[in-house]
């Protein structure tokens, strides 16, 4: 799913209402991405509870804190709605005017949130807070993924930079080596990456797209400076520490937790990497893909080498097995965008969940308009925080987009079950939960289900069919894991100052090699800004959520299969049509962010710790096969 989607900006309240991508390849969604608010310079912009207090107010009480929390939630819903509206327009109609309009609204939101967070500090030592007030104050403190300085001029500069960075990405095109060829956007270049098997053609598409991010570098450096200043004003060492505080544990503990989960899954990734590299060496030659070395980044079927499913035909374990080519069936049966989304909706309603509102079908962007520039990156939205559900995609009749649709609808269904909660509770238990919901459902899109709905003629039988299917899944879900982890590892190091601006690109490729075993296909320098060629960096969308989601989706899937009373192997389970599983899922969705994430995890799974063992269980047959194939190979890099 190219990106699993990111976009209500799932991340509690991110800075720029970046619609949350719902796929790692996906985009954020329009929820709380950005904290919106009125200009700080205007008295009315301060939280209402504070406007009524004289400068030398009495010691605040628990009731003062409760009233403050209530009013901030009301203000945020109003402001985030304005912000999401401006962002929707900007994303679906990219012009200088819509960028400027969004920047002005984002500046307003930043000012409000900045002020509200500072006002909330007054209640830090108040005794006797009820649980909801205490949680609301905590969520407010960590609510912005792009904290703004209190200085109005700097705040305006930050909002402008954020809008400009996303605009540079959205308008990016490659027009040939001399700049005079036919211009190709990311979608067209991604098609080349997915389909071509010509080494040089792939290299040109890769270098062409990565050139679009070079102008972002000075803007990003300034964004780091300004957002860190904002984070420090509200008590965090830097913006990365603020992001890591979103997980109901100290920032350093979360960093260790992410590494613990990576340690669980790394052996499975290493086995897959070794096998795929050997197959690529057969395709392109061992001189280009040597054993024991990182894989050139442009050969894995994806612009960022984040998912490898597009080169499945090069690594297919057993030729001649029943076709897993859903793309050809979608095209043969003339599936259009609406029909594909309707199929996604039917999966959720089969579990007893409610249908999407009529406004969803009237207001979503399903296909790429011919008359204007838009951000095609998939995202899910609730624009008014009142069940105004939408998705924004440029849907093509492919299996990848069908899966992405399920992922984005997972965001929408989360929104629809918690939209009546206060604004700061309108989020996932943590941002990885939001991303995992739709993906957990896609694990039930088994060959049996696809045959049932007419998209597979035959269900693969026997071990060979199973290994083929698991390889296809692993090329997307397992291959993504290290990329899902390293994007924020890079940003955390940049934001903390451990990586200096003069080493941005060097540090990026050091992490790509360390975690992914992937290297730049041509010489790179600090004139390049390769992190900016990935949407979530210029759009300032935290990315660890996608790593967590890839792990949680299997944990969710196992629990839902158990609730459905399924017996047998985990990879064979589909909960399609099971109302008991739907009830368990709904119970978690309705909680939103109202409780710490271990409580939400327990509601669905009965466990209070994230655990990758379900993923290892799911792929156990493939891993045994990979280890057999890799005997005699020089694995590692």
Image: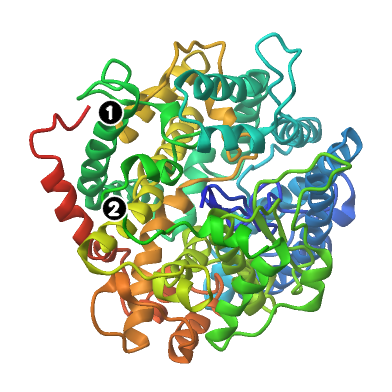
Query: x%, y% of residue 460?
Result: 33, 67
Disc marking residue 282: 1
Q: Residue drawn at (37%, 29%), measured in percent from left and top? A: 511
Nearest the camera: 515 or 147? 515
Query: What distance separates the C-alpha of mark 2 from that of mark 1?
Result: 33 Å
User: Which residue shows up at 38% across the image and 80% down it?
Assistant: 560
Which residue sits furthest left? 632
Residue 599 x/y as whole percent: 41, 75
Relative horizontal placement of residue 127, taking residue 53 as reference (left or right) = left
What colour scheme governs how the chains and residues are painted in the rendered image of this protein? rainbow
- Whether residue 473 is visible to the viewer of this picture, yes or no, is yes
Is residue 6 visible in the rendered image? The answer is: no
Q: Is residue 379 left or right of residue 124?
A: right
Q: Which disc number belongs to residue 614?
A: none
Pointer 2 with pointer 1, Cβ within 8 A: no
The residue that label 2 is drawn on is: 261
Residue 85 x, y percent position in the rendering: 83, 56
Question: Relative to 558, does residue 520 appear above or below in the rendering?
Answer: above
- Please give the name of the residue rendered at 32% of the width and 80% of the height, measured from the top-left corner: 606
- Looking at the rendered structure, the number of numbered marks drawn on it comes to 2
Q: Is residue 83 left or right of residue 294?
A: right
């Amino acid at each position: 799913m190219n990106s699993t989607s990111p976009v209500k900006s799932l991340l509690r309240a991110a800075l720029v209402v970046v619609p949350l991508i719902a796929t790692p390849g996906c985009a954020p969604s329009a929820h709380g991405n950005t904290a919106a608010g009125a200009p700080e310079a205007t008295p009315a912009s301060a939280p209402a509870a504070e406007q009524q207090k004289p400068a030398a107010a009495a010691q605040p009480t628990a009731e003062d804190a409760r009233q403050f929390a209530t009013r901030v939630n009301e203000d945020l819903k109003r402001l985030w709605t304005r912000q999401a509206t401006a962002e929707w327009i900007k994303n679906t109609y990219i012009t200088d005017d819509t960028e400027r309009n969004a920047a002005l609204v984002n500046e307003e939101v930043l000012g409000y949130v900045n002020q509200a967070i500072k006002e909330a500090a007054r209640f830090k030592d108040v005794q006797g807070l009820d649980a909801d007030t205490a949680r609301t104050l905590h969520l407010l403190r960590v609510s912005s993924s792009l904290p703004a300085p209190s200085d109005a001029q700097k705040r305006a500069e930050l909002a402008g930079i954020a809008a400009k960075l996303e605009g540079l990405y959205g308008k990016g095109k490659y027009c040939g080596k001399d700049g005079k060829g036919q211009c190709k956007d990311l979608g067209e270049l991604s098609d080349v990456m997915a389909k071509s098997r010509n080494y040089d053609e792939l290299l040109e598409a890769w270098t062409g797209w990565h050139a679009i991010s070079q102008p972002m570098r000075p803007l990003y450096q300034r964004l780091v400076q300004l957002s860190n200043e904002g984070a420090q004003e509200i008590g965090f060492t830097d913006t990365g520490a603020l992001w890591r505080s979103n997980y109901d544990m100290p920032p350093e503990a979360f960093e260790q937790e992410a590494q613990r989960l990576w340690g669980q899954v790394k052996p499975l990734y290493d086995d897959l990497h070794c096998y795929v590299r050997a197959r690529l060496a057969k395709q392109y030659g061992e001189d280009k893909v040597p054993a024991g070395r990182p894989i050139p980044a442009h050969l894995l079927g994806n612009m960022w080498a984040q998912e490898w499913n597009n080169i499945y035909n090069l690594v297919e374990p057993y030729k001649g097995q029943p076709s897993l080519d859903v793309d050809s069936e979608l095209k043969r049966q003339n599936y259009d965008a609406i029909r594909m989304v309707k199929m996604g909706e039917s999966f959720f309603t089969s579990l007893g969940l409610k249908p999407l509102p009529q406004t969803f079908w009237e207001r979503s962007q399903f296909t790429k308009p011919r008359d204007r520039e838009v951000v095609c990156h998939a995202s899910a939205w609730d624009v008014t925080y009142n069940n105004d559900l939408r998705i924004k995609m440029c849907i093509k009749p492919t299996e990848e987009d069908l899966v992405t649709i399920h992922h984005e609808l997972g965001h929408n269904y989360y929104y629809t079950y918690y939209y009546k909660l206060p604004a700061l509770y309108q989020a996932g238990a943590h941002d990885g939960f939001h991303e995992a919901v739709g993906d957990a459902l896609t694990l039930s899109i088994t060959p049996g289900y696809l045959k049932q709905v007419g998209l597979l003629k035959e269900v693969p039988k026997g071990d060979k069919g199973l290994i083929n299917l698991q390889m296809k899944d692993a090329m997307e879900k397992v291959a993504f894991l290290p990329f899902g982890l390293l994007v924020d590892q890079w940003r955390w190091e940049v934001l903390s100052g451990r990586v200096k601006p003069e080493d941005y690109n060097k540090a990026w490729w050091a992490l790509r090699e360390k975690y992914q075993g992937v290297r730049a296909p041509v010489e790179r320098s600090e004139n390049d800004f390769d992190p900016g060629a990935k949407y979530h960096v210029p759009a300032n969308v935290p990315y660890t959520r996608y790593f967590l989601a890839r792990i949680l989706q299997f944990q969710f899937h196992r629990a839902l299969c158990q609730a459905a009373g399924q017996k047998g192997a985990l990879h064979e389970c589909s909960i399609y049509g099971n109302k008991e599983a739907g009830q368990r899922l709904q119970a978690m969705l309705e909680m939103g962010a109202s409780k710490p994430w271990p409580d939400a995890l327990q509601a669905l799974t009965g466990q209070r710790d994230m655990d990758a063992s379900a993923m290892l269980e799911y792929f156990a047959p493939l891993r045994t096969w990979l280890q057999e194939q890799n005997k005699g190979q020089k694995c590692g890099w």
